[in-house]
Amino acid sequence: MAAESSKAGEKRAEMEVDELLKMLQLSEEEKDGVVLAKEDRENLPAVKWMAAAKLLTAKEFSVTSLVSTMRSAWNPAREVTFRSIGKNLLVVQAFCLGDWKRIMEDGPWIFRGYALMLEELDGSTTIPSEMPSKVLGWIQIHKIPHLFRTEAIVKQLAAKVGEVQEIEMKAIASRTGDFHRVRVKLAAAKPLIRVVTLAPEGQARILLQVKYEKLPRFCAHCGLVGHVHLECGAGEYTEKDLQFGSWMVADAESWHPGTPRFRSSAPGDREMPRDGGGRGGVKPTRGGRGQVGGRGGRGPMWKAKVTTTSESGSRKRTSADVGDDNKDDRELDDMASSPVKTAAQAGVGEEPPPGARKQLVMDAGPVVPL
Ligand SMILES: [Zn+2]
Protein backbone atom coordinates (compact mmCIF):
# COMPACT_ATOMS: atom_id res chain seq x y z
CA MET A 1 0.00 0.00 0.00
CA ALA A 2 2.72 2.40 1.12
CA ALA A 3 4.82 1.47 -1.88
CA GLU A 4 1.94 2.17 -4.20
CA SER A 5 1.21 5.59 -2.77
CA SER A 6 4.85 6.62 -2.89
CA LYS A 7 4.87 5.53 -6.53
CA ALA A 8 1.82 7.67 -7.17
CA GLY A 9 3.62 10.56 -5.48
CA GLU A 10 6.63 10.11 -7.74
CA LYS A 11 4.42 10.10 -10.78
CA ARG A 12 2.76 13.31 -9.68
CA ALA A 13 6.13 14.95 -9.13
CA GLU A 14 7.20 13.85 -12.58
CA MET A 15 4.13 15.40 -14.13
CA GLU A 16 4.69 18.64 -12.29
CA VAL A 17 8.24 18.79 -13.66
CA ASP A 18 6.87 18.30 -17.17
CA GLU A 19 4.58 21.28 -16.65
CA LEU A 20 7.44 23.33 -15.26
CA LEU A 21 9.68 22.53 -18.25
CA LYS A 22 7.08 23.92 -20.60
CA MET A 23 7.12 27.25 -18.80
CA LEU A 24 10.88 27.77 -18.60
CA GLN A 25 12.54 30.57 -20.50
CA LEU A 26 15.30 28.78 -22.35
CA SER A 27 18.82 30.12 -22.72
CA GLU A 28 20.44 30.30 -26.16
CA GLU A 29 22.49 27.25 -25.33
CA GLU A 30 19.45 25.29 -24.32
CA LYS A 31 17.63 26.30 -27.46
CA ASP A 32 20.49 25.26 -29.68
CA GLY A 33 19.25 21.76 -30.34
CA VAL A 34 20.49 18.76 -32.28
CA VAL A 35 19.30 19.25 -35.81
CA LEU A 36 18.18 16.18 -37.70
CA ALA A 37 18.30 16.59 -41.45
CA LYS A 38 15.42 15.16 -43.41
CA GLU A 39 17.50 12.37 -44.92
CA ASP A 40 18.95 11.46 -41.54
CA ARG A 41 15.49 11.33 -40.14
CA GLU A 42 14.30 9.15 -42.98
CA ASN A 43 17.15 6.74 -42.39
CA LEU A 44 16.11 6.08 -38.83
CA PRO A 45 14.93 2.55 -38.28
CA ALA A 46 11.12 2.54 -38.14
CA VAL A 47 9.57 2.09 -34.74
CA LYS A 48 7.15 -0.71 -35.27
CA TRP A 49 4.07 -1.99 -33.55
CA MET A 50 3.86 0.66 -30.89
CA ALA A 51 0.68 2.24 -29.58
CA ALA A 52 -0.47 4.58 -26.89
CA ALA A 53 -3.12 3.09 -24.64
CA LYS A 54 -5.62 4.83 -22.40
CA LEU A 55 -8.50 3.42 -20.40
CA LEU A 56 -11.76 5.22 -21.04
CA THR A 57 -12.72 6.06 -17.48
CA ALA A 58 -12.36 8.90 -15.03
CA LYS A 59 -12.02 6.40 -12.20
CA GLU A 60 -8.84 5.24 -10.56
CA PHE A 61 -7.60 1.79 -11.42
CA SER A 62 -4.54 -0.33 -10.95
CA VAL A 63 -2.17 -0.15 -13.91
CA THR A 64 -0.56 -3.37 -12.75
CA SER A 65 -3.78 -5.26 -12.99
CA LEU A 66 -4.64 -3.62 -16.31
CA VAL A 67 -1.33 -4.79 -17.71
CA SER A 68 -1.66 -8.34 -16.43
CA THR A 69 -5.25 -8.53 -17.64
CA MET A 70 -4.34 -7.36 -21.12
CA ARG A 71 -1.40 -9.72 -21.27
CA SER A 72 -3.66 -12.62 -20.53
CA ALA A 73 -6.42 -11.43 -22.87
CA TRP A 74 -4.02 -10.87 -25.74
CA ASN A 75 -2.06 -14.02 -25.04
CA PRO A 76 0.78 -12.78 -27.24
CA ALA A 77 3.09 -15.13 -29.07
CA ARG A 78 6.02 -12.89 -28.28
CA GLU A 79 6.75 -10.32 -25.65
CA VAL A 80 4.50 -7.29 -25.35
CA THR A 81 5.87 -4.40 -23.31
CA PHE A 82 3.98 -1.74 -21.39
CA ARG A 83 5.47 1.55 -20.31
CA SER A 84 3.61 4.11 -18.27
CA ILE A 85 4.14 7.63 -19.59
CA GLY A 86 1.54 9.55 -17.64
CA LYS A 87 -1.62 9.21 -15.65
CA ASN A 88 -3.77 6.68 -17.46
CA LEU A 89 -1.43 6.63 -20.43
CA LEU A 90 0.73 3.72 -21.46
CA VAL A 91 2.91 2.84 -24.39
CA VAL A 92 2.35 -0.69 -25.59
CA GLN A 93 4.74 -2.39 -27.95
CA ALA A 94 4.41 -5.72 -29.69
CA PHE A 95 7.27 -7.59 -31.30
CA CYS A 96 5.58 -9.52 -34.04
CA LEU A 97 2.93 -8.67 -36.59
CA GLY A 98 0.55 -11.33 -35.32
CA ASP A 99 0.44 -9.89 -31.82
CA TRP A 100 0.18 -6.39 -33.19
CA LYS A 101 -2.78 -7.16 -35.42
CA ARG A 102 -4.59 -8.93 -32.66
CA ILE A 103 -4.09 -6.03 -30.26
CA MET A 104 -5.10 -3.39 -32.79
CA GLU A 105 -7.89 -5.17 -34.63
CA ASP A 106 -9.58 -7.59 -32.29
CA GLY A 107 -10.97 -5.07 -29.84
CA PRO A 108 -12.78 -3.71 -28.04
CA TRP A 109 -10.56 -4.63 -25.13
CA ILE A 110 -12.39 -4.17 -21.92
CA PHE A 111 -11.01 -3.86 -18.43
CA ARG A 112 -13.48 -3.68 -15.53
CA GLY A 113 -16.14 -2.68 -18.01
CA TYR A 114 -14.09 0.16 -19.47
CA ALA A 115 -12.61 0.26 -22.94
CA LEU A 116 -8.89 0.31 -23.54
CA MET A 117 -8.36 2.79 -26.37
CA LEU A 118 -5.31 2.36 -28.55
CA GLU A 119 -3.65 4.73 -30.99
CA GLU A 120 -0.69 3.79 -33.14
CA LEU A 121 2.54 5.67 -32.41
CA ASP A 122 5.47 6.33 -34.71
CA GLY A 123 7.79 7.04 -31.79
CA SER A 124 8.66 10.56 -32.94
CA THR A 125 7.29 12.28 -29.85
CA THR A 126 7.55 11.51 -26.16
CA ILE A 127 3.89 12.23 -25.55
CA PRO A 128 1.60 10.94 -28.31
CA SER A 129 0.63 13.66 -30.75
CA GLU A 130 -2.77 12.07 -30.97
CA MET A 131 -4.18 10.79 -27.70
CA PRO A 132 -6.10 7.54 -27.82
CA SER A 133 -9.74 8.54 -28.17
CA LYS A 134 -11.42 5.79 -30.13
CA VAL A 135 -13.05 2.54 -29.22
CA LEU A 136 -12.88 -0.25 -31.73
CA GLY A 137 -15.90 -2.43 -32.20
CA TRP A 138 -18.16 -4.39 -34.49
CA ILE A 139 -21.56 -2.96 -35.21
CA GLN A 140 -24.56 -4.53 -36.86
CA ILE A 141 -26.83 -2.55 -39.14
CA HIS A 142 -30.17 -4.27 -39.09
CA LYS A 143 -32.65 -4.92 -41.84
CA ILE A 144 -31.24 -2.90 -44.68
CA PRO A 145 -33.81 -3.27 -47.51
CA HIS A 146 -32.49 -5.61 -50.19
CA LEU A 147 -32.28 -2.99 -52.90
CA PHE A 148 -29.82 -0.96 -50.87
CA ARG A 149 -27.41 -3.71 -49.90
CA THR A 150 -24.40 -2.45 -51.77
CA GLU A 151 -21.01 -1.96 -50.25
CA ALA A 152 -21.10 1.76 -50.95
CA ILE A 153 -24.40 2.22 -49.15
CA VAL A 154 -23.47 0.02 -46.18
CA LYS A 155 -20.22 1.94 -45.91
CA GLN A 156 -21.97 5.29 -45.88
CA LEU A 157 -24.44 4.09 -43.28
CA ALA A 158 -21.67 2.73 -41.07
CA ALA A 159 -19.68 5.94 -41.45
CA LYS A 160 -22.50 7.67 -39.55
CA VAL A 161 -21.60 5.47 -36.59
CA GLY A 162 -17.82 5.58 -36.68
CA GLU A 163 -14.68 5.38 -38.76
CA VAL A 164 -15.18 2.37 -41.02
CA GLN A 165 -12.44 -0.26 -40.83
CA GLU A 166 -13.96 -3.26 -42.51
CA ILE A 167 -17.30 -4.27 -43.97
CA GLU A 168 -18.82 -7.72 -44.18
CA MET A 169 -21.21 -7.68 -47.07
CA LYS A 170 -22.85 -10.99 -46.32
CA ALA A 171 -26.13 -10.48 -44.50
CA ILE A 172 -26.37 -12.58 -41.37
CA ALA A 173 -29.65 -14.09 -40.29
CA SER A 174 -30.85 -13.65 -36.75
CA ARG A 175 -34.04 -14.08 -34.78
CA THR A 176 -34.88 -10.43 -35.22
CA GLY A 177 -34.07 -10.08 -38.90
CA ASP A 178 -30.82 -10.03 -40.77
CA PHE A 179 -27.98 -7.59 -40.46
CA HIS A 180 -24.66 -6.50 -41.91
CA ARG A 181 -21.55 -6.28 -39.79
CA VAL A 182 -19.03 -3.47 -39.94
CA ARG A 183 -15.91 -2.94 -37.87
CA VAL A 184 -15.68 0.69 -36.84
CA LYS A 185 -13.73 2.99 -34.61
CA LEU A 186 -16.15 4.86 -32.36
CA ALA A 187 -15.22 8.34 -31.20
CA ALA A 188 -15.25 8.23 -27.41
CA ALA A 189 -16.32 11.86 -27.21
CA LYS A 190 -19.53 11.28 -29.15
CA PRO A 191 -22.74 9.63 -27.98
CA LEU A 192 -23.39 6.20 -29.42
CA ILE A 193 -25.48 6.13 -32.55
CA ARG A 194 -28.67 4.12 -32.17
CA VAL A 195 -30.10 4.30 -35.66
CA VAL A 196 -28.93 5.32 -39.07
CA THR A 197 -31.29 6.88 -41.55
CA LEU A 198 -31.51 5.96 -45.17
CA ALA A 199 -33.33 8.53 -47.26
CA PRO A 200 -33.82 7.33 -50.83
CA GLU A 201 -35.04 10.14 -53.03
CA GLY A 202 -38.77 9.98 -53.64
CA GLN A 203 -39.27 7.59 -50.77
CA ALA A 204 -39.93 7.93 -47.07
CA ARG A 205 -36.81 7.78 -44.94
CA ILE A 206 -35.98 4.46 -43.41
CA LEU A 207 -34.62 4.07 -39.91
CA LEU A 208 -32.21 1.20 -39.45
CA GLN A 209 -31.24 0.02 -36.01
CA VAL A 210 -27.57 -0.20 -35.11
CA LYS A 211 -26.52 -2.80 -32.58
CA TYR A 212 -23.15 -3.15 -30.97
CA GLU A 213 -21.64 -6.58 -30.64
CA LYS A 214 -19.77 -5.63 -27.58
CA LEU A 215 -19.83 -2.46 -25.62
CA PRO A 216 -17.96 -1.22 -22.62
CA ARG A 217 -20.01 0.42 -19.89
CA PHE A 218 -22.04 3.25 -21.38
CA CYS A 219 -24.44 5.88 -20.18
CA ALA A 220 -28.17 5.38 -20.67
CA HIS A 221 -28.68 9.13 -20.39
CA CYS A 222 -26.04 10.78 -22.58
CA GLY A 223 -24.96 7.78 -24.65
CA LEU A 224 -21.27 8.23 -23.98
CA VAL A 225 -19.06 5.27 -23.30
CA GLY A 226 -17.06 5.22 -20.05
CA HIS A 227 -19.63 5.82 -17.32
CA VAL A 228 -23.17 4.81 -16.40
CA HIS A 229 -26.15 7.12 -16.00
CA LEU A 230 -26.00 7.03 -12.21
CA GLU A 231 -22.61 8.72 -12.51
CA CYS A 232 -23.71 11.18 -15.19
CA GLY A 233 -24.22 14.61 -13.63
CA ALA A 234 -26.29 14.13 -10.50
CA GLY A 235 -27.34 10.74 -11.79
CA GLU A 236 -31.05 11.27 -11.17
CA TYR A 237 -33.04 10.56 -14.26
CA THR A 238 -36.54 9.51 -15.05
CA GLU A 239 -37.25 6.74 -17.48
CA LYS A 240 -37.80 9.08 -20.39
CA ASP A 241 -34.38 10.65 -19.83
CA LEU A 242 -32.78 7.32 -20.50
CA GLN A 243 -32.58 7.27 -24.26
CA PHE A 244 -29.90 4.64 -24.53
CA GLY A 245 -29.94 1.15 -23.16
CA SER A 246 -29.01 -2.47 -23.31
CA TRP A 247 -31.33 -2.94 -26.30
CA MET A 248 -28.47 -1.43 -28.30
CA VAL A 249 -26.25 -4.38 -27.51
CA ALA A 250 -26.53 -7.27 -29.95
CA ASP A 251 -27.50 -10.64 -28.57
CA ALA A 252 -24.28 -12.58 -28.42
CA GLU A 253 -26.06 -15.51 -30.00
CA SER A 254 -26.74 -13.43 -33.08
CA TRP A 255 -23.07 -13.12 -33.87
CA HIS A 256 -21.29 -15.62 -31.75
CA PRO A 257 -20.27 -18.45 -34.05
CA GLY A 258 -20.03 -21.15 -31.43
CA THR A 259 -23.69 -21.32 -30.48
CA PRO A 260 -26.02 -23.91 -31.97
CA ARG A 261 -28.60 -21.24 -32.67
CA PHE A 262 -26.16 -19.32 -34.73
CA ARG A 263 -25.15 -22.39 -36.65
CA SER A 264 -28.70 -23.35 -37.42
CA SER A 265 -29.76 -19.87 -38.38
CA ALA A 266 -26.97 -19.38 -40.84
CA PRO A 267 -25.84 -22.73 -42.12
CA GLY A 268 -22.51 -22.47 -43.85
CA ASP A 269 -22.85 -18.78 -43.85
CA ARG A 270 -19.50 -18.15 -42.32
CA GLU A 271 -16.48 -19.99 -41.24
CA MET A 272 -16.11 -20.94 -37.66
CA PRO A 273 -12.45 -20.90 -36.84
CA ARG A 274 -11.73 -23.11 -33.88
CA ASP A 275 -8.08 -22.45 -33.50
CA GLY A 276 -8.08 -18.92 -32.22
CA GLY A 277 -8.11 -17.71 -35.80
CA GLY A 278 -7.13 -14.15 -35.06
CA ARG A 279 -3.85 -14.98 -33.54
CA GLY A 280 -0.75 -15.02 -35.59
CA GLY A 281 -2.37 -12.78 -38.13
CA VAL A 282 -4.03 -15.60 -39.96
CA LYS A 283 -7.48 -14.18 -39.72
CA PRO A 284 -7.05 -11.14 -37.62
CA THR A 285 -10.38 -9.65 -38.43
CA ARG A 286 -12.26 -12.69 -37.35
CA GLY A 287 -10.11 -13.32 -34.38
CA GLY A 288 -12.58 -11.98 -31.90
CA ARG A 289 -15.09 -14.55 -32.85
CA GLY A 290 -12.71 -17.25 -33.80
CA GLN A 291 -11.15 -17.04 -30.48
CA VAL A 292 -14.25 -18.31 -28.79
CA GLY A 293 -13.74 -21.72 -30.23
CA GLY A 294 -10.07 -21.40 -29.60
CA ARG A 295 -10.58 -20.84 -25.94
CA GLY A 296 -12.61 -23.95 -25.89
CA GLY A 297 -15.88 -24.89 -24.37
CA ARG A 298 -17.17 -21.46 -23.65
CA GLY A 299 -19.94 -21.57 -26.17
CA PRO A 300 -22.68 -23.45 -24.40
CA MET A 301 -22.10 -21.83 -21.05
CA TRP A 302 -22.11 -18.53 -22.73
CA LYS A 303 -25.32 -19.16 -24.49
CA ALA A 304 -27.02 -20.15 -21.30
CA LYS A 305 -25.95 -16.86 -19.77
CA VAL A 306 -26.98 -14.84 -22.70
CA THR A 307 -30.47 -16.23 -22.85
CA THR A 308 -31.09 -14.67 -19.48
CA THR A 309 -31.49 -10.93 -19.49
CA SER A 310 -28.54 -8.65 -19.59
CA GLU A 311 -28.78 -7.89 -15.94
CA SER A 312 -26.15 -8.57 -13.40
CA GLY A 313 -27.46 -12.09 -13.02
CA SER A 314 -26.05 -12.93 -16.40
CA ARG A 315 -22.57 -11.97 -15.47
CA LYS A 316 -20.05 -14.67 -15.67
CA ARG A 317 -19.07 -15.71 -12.23
CA THR A 318 -15.52 -16.64 -11.71
CA SER A 319 -14.33 -18.79 -8.88
CA ALA A 320 -13.39 -15.66 -7.02
CA ASP A 321 -16.99 -14.48 -7.18
CA VAL A 322 -18.29 -17.25 -5.06
CA GLY A 323 -19.37 -15.98 -1.73
CA ASP A 324 -18.22 -12.52 -2.57
CA ASP A 325 -20.85 -9.88 -2.78
CA ASN A 326 -18.51 -7.02 -3.40
CA LYS A 327 -19.35 -5.89 -6.88
CA ASP A 328 -16.09 -4.09 -7.46
CA ASP A 329 -14.06 -7.09 -6.53
CA ARG A 330 -16.13 -9.18 -8.84
CA GLU A 331 -15.42 -6.78 -11.64
CA LEU A 332 -11.74 -7.13 -10.97
CA ASP A 333 -12.00 -10.81 -11.61
CA ASP A 334 -14.07 -10.36 -14.66
CA MET A 335 -12.16 -7.79 -16.55
CA ALA A 336 -10.09 -9.79 -18.95
CA SER A 337 -12.50 -9.13 -21.63
CA SER A 338 -11.84 -9.68 -25.25
CA PRO A 339 -14.59 -9.66 -27.83
CA VAL A 340 -15.63 -13.13 -26.80
CA LYS A 341 -17.54 -11.79 -23.88
CA THR A 342 -20.88 -10.11 -24.04
CA ALA A 343 -21.37 -6.58 -22.97
CA ALA A 344 -23.59 -7.84 -20.23
CA GLN A 345 -20.79 -9.97 -18.90
CA ALA A 346 -18.43 -7.09 -19.10
CA GLY A 347 -20.72 -5.09 -16.89
CA VAL A 348 -22.65 -2.89 -19.27
CA GLY A 349 -25.96 -4.28 -18.26
CA GLU A 350 -25.08 -4.07 -14.67
CA GLU A 351 -27.30 -1.16 -14.01
CA PRO A 352 -29.83 -1.29 -16.78
CA PRO A 353 -32.15 1.64 -16.72
CA PRO A 354 -35.79 0.72 -16.36
CA GLY A 355 -36.42 1.64 -19.96
CA ALA A 356 -33.42 -0.18 -21.24
CA ARG A 357 -34.90 -3.61 -20.97
CA LYS A 358 -37.68 -2.72 -23.28
CA GLN A 359 -37.49 -3.86 -26.78
CA LEU A 360 -37.08 -1.46 -29.58
CA VAL A 361 -39.30 -2.22 -32.49
CA MET A 362 -37.52 -1.36 -35.67
CA ASP A 363 -39.56 -2.26 -38.65
CA ALA A 364 -38.24 0.18 -41.15
CA GLY A 365 -40.41 2.67 -39.36
CA PRO A 366 -40.16 5.11 -36.51
CA VAL A 367 -38.65 4.16 -33.19
CA VAL A 368 -41.42 2.80 -31.03
CA PRO A 369 -40.41 1.95 -27.50
CA LEU A 370 -42.99 -0.49 -26.19
ZN1 LIG B 1 -23.63 10.25 -19.26
Image (tube, rainbow, N blue to C red):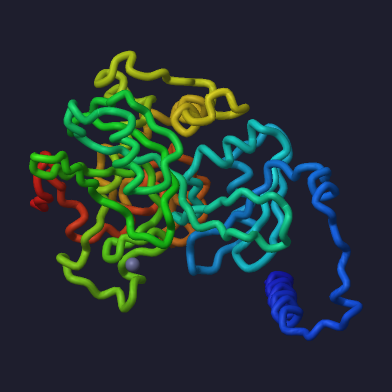
- Residue at horizontal 87 percent and vertical 77 percent from the top: 30
Left or right, 142 with respect to 3, comes to left
Viewer-side residue, 195 vs 272? 195
Q: Position of residue 48 (x, y in %)?
A: 72, 42
* Residue 8 visible in the snapshot: yes
Viewer-side residue, 285 vs 293? 285
- Residue at horizontal 80 percent and vertical 51 percent from the top: 38
* Residue 2 visible in the snapshot: no
- Residue at horizontal 30 percent and vertical 38 percent from the top: 140
Q: Is residue 149 above or below residue 80?
A: above
Left or right, 100 with respect to 42, comes to left
Viewer-side residue, 152 vs 252? 152
Left or right, 349 with respect to 205, comes to right
Quadrant of the image where one finds ligand 1: bottom left
Q: Position of residue 344 (x, y in %)?
A: 34, 48
Q: Which residue lies most toward the top here?
A: 268
Q: Position of residue 112 (x, y in %)?
A: 48, 55
- Residue at horizontal 33 percent and vertical 59 percent from the top: 191
Q: Is residue 12 above or below residue 94?
A: below
- Residue 227, by quadrant, is bottom left
